[in-house]
Image (tube, rainbow, N blue to C red):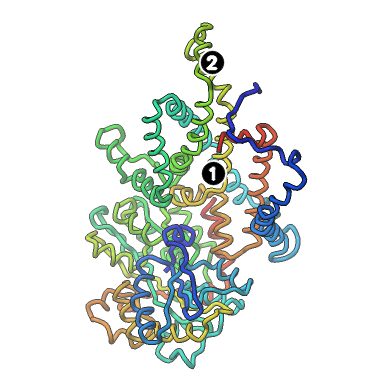
Amino acid sequence: MRLRTTLASLLVSAALPVSAADMVFTSWGGTTQDAQTQAWAEPFTAETGVDVLQDGPTDYGKIKAMVESGSVSWDVVDVEGDYAAQAGPAGLLEPLDFMVIDRSKLDPRFVTDYSVGSFYYAFVIGCNRDAADDCPKTWADLFDTEKFPGKRAFYKWSAPGVIEAALLADGVAPADLYPLDLDRAFAKLDTIKDDIIWWSSGAQSQQLLASAETPFGSFWNGRLTALAESGVTVETSWDQNITAADSLVVPKGAKNKAEAMKFIALATSAKPQAELAAATGYAPINLDAPSEMDPKVRATLPDAQDAAQVNADMEYWAAHRDEIGTRWYAWQAE
Amino acid sequence: MPAVAVPVSSRPAPLGAAEPSGFAYVVPALLLVIVFFVFPVAALLLRSVTEPAPGLGNYAELFGSTTYLRIFLNTFLVSGLVTLISVTAGFPVAWMLAIMPRRLGRIVFAILILSMWTNLLARTYAWMVLLQRTGVINKTLMAMGVIDKPLELVNNLTGVTIGMTYIMLPFVILPLTGVIRAIDPAILQAAALCGATRAQALRRVLLPLALPGILSGALMVFVMSLGYFVTPALLGGTANMMLAELIAQFVQSLVNWGMGAAAAFALLVVTLGLYALQLRFFGPGRAGGL
């Protein structure tokens, strides 16, 4: 899950030294990486005897630098799906070994030659019941400052989620989202620009909602689950929830490729996927994982909401990532 | 500029005056600087004119776009504001520290230093919580009836300025204290004996004598502010973006190293220019004792 890299790097202590027999797994830090360590790395070490060193946070600049210099110290990296779809064909990633990784059990939405899903999440509408008289139920509500006055929280970085929400709020049917009509999306976003407070990390989004600085907004579903468990009265609307996935990739030239493939095979198998989902509130990408899960836990995950799901198109994002990103940041800074 | 005796315990001899054989001792340091500084900076510059295509395209895009120019201007605006407020607020504190009894002074010093040792991110988050609309400051003011709707203190220029000034204050206070302490108190007594009022003694004696410390502290804060990242990213809204944030976006999110390098190089040139100005006017030994 995407924590802002530079900010997060201040939270994560110095990278661990790496010896030859080990492999390195890199993710975004925080509770999600803790859960990945517990659900994936620990059983992997128990099974293979290979130690998994945790590093982070994921940094696309670093991946490029490592691959270009030929000194790749990360073996498996948790990245955003749209990045994986772009970086693979761009020559930054190793093709995955599907003799080792069982592709047939994986949700095909999140599999490419260079990447498999890590877990998937949904942007949902979250609302602090104690702070708002009325909670927005749809994206159109969230963009309606007359019906729902006050500040609202949105994800700061250029990624699938906010542009889709703007278009859905403007009345575009989910089936007609792609190719994204950027002019229309930014025009819609302009109508609420002064009322947006941007969150740059999951922790910040929780702080904004819990303190009622923003009584509502668009959030990662797992963060709302965690907030509700901590005692905040959170109302979640899954209406047209926008799903996107994190992916597991192996940077080109990784030193422990064989171990990396085995690690991914285990991480994406049914039981570790089920355990990660239970710990994080995000959905498993292994098709057999749901049957391994407590039905009560399953009901809180994005995959129980598939009737209301809108899938972000990773292929489209991969092809237009740079163009959208450049325009997005320029628009924000205007 | 009046000739001022700035106490520098061991002022280095100018390089030219060293014995020829002394140069050998400099070689390791020089190599270090070349390998870890000169070489990467040259590589950076090279990238800015070769990626994605050879030429000055990146610079043209950087300086040809009103958005990016606004980010440049905003960077200077914020840095200037922070410098002005830090110096204005830091001077009285430094003065107080300088004339305090040593023991008490040490305690205040320790408090200042402690705040610098606390994690930057934690301090910035604390400001976020204090300043937000539902934060302590707004709630207290509203409970007291001073205001009836919350002030916008964060996610804008106000938030960045408050947060950065807080972080930069020690960098003004510490060198300035050293400079003020070195001023002979007898000079102020002499001023008083000659009939100067307190205000006159401050304006015409203390301030001119402390000026080198003020200017070098100000320059340091200004230069540090130009490249600041965390605080503006968390306390400023996106409309108040600063250059360091833009560079981070280019390098990490968009993986557009050509543009990132161009922006970083532009910032470096400005910073070096300011440093050259400092050297020109105050000399290398006058950096306020730091």
Residue A147: in sight, yes or no?
no
Q: Amino acid at mark 1?
A: Ser
Residue A282 figure quarter: bottom left
Badge 2 marks a residue whose secondary structure is helix
Q: Looking at the image, is B62 positioned above or below residue B290? A: below
Q: What residue lies at 50% left-to-right and 63% top-to-bottom? A: A158
Residue A284 figure quarter: bottom left
Judging by the rendered image, the residue that carries numbered circle 2 is: B187
User: Is A143 displayed left or right of A93 in the figure?
Assistant: left
Taking depth in this image into account, of A294 and B96 the one nearest to the observer is: B96
The numbered dot on residue B225 is: 1
Q: Nearer the viewer, mark 1 or mark 2?
A: 2
Looking at marks 1 and 2 on the same chain, the residue that comes earlier in the sequence is marked by 2
Crowd tier of the residue under label 1, counting other residues whose Cα lies within 10 Å: few below 14, some 14–19, many 20 or above: many
Image coordinates for residue A133, horizontal then vertical, percent: 25, 53
Mark 2 belongs to which subunit? B
> Looking at the rendering, in which quadrant would you find the N terminus of chain A?
bottom left
Badge 1 marks a residue whose secondary structure is helix
Q: What residue lies at 42% left-to-right and 79% top-to-bottom? A: A51
The numbered dot on residue A77 is: none
Q: Looking at the image, is A135 positioned above or below residue B145? A: below
Crowd tier of the residue under label 2, counting other residues whose Cα lies within 10 Å: few below 14, some 14–19, many 20 or above: few
Image coordinates for residue A114, horizontal then vertical, percent: 53, 82
State the separation of the CA atoms marked 1 and 2.
Answer: 35 Å
Taking depth in this image into account, of A98 and A319 the one nearest to the observer is: A98
Mark 1 belongs to which subunit? B
Image coordinates for residue B244, horizontal then vertical, percent: 56, 52
Q: Amino acid at mark 2?
A: Ile
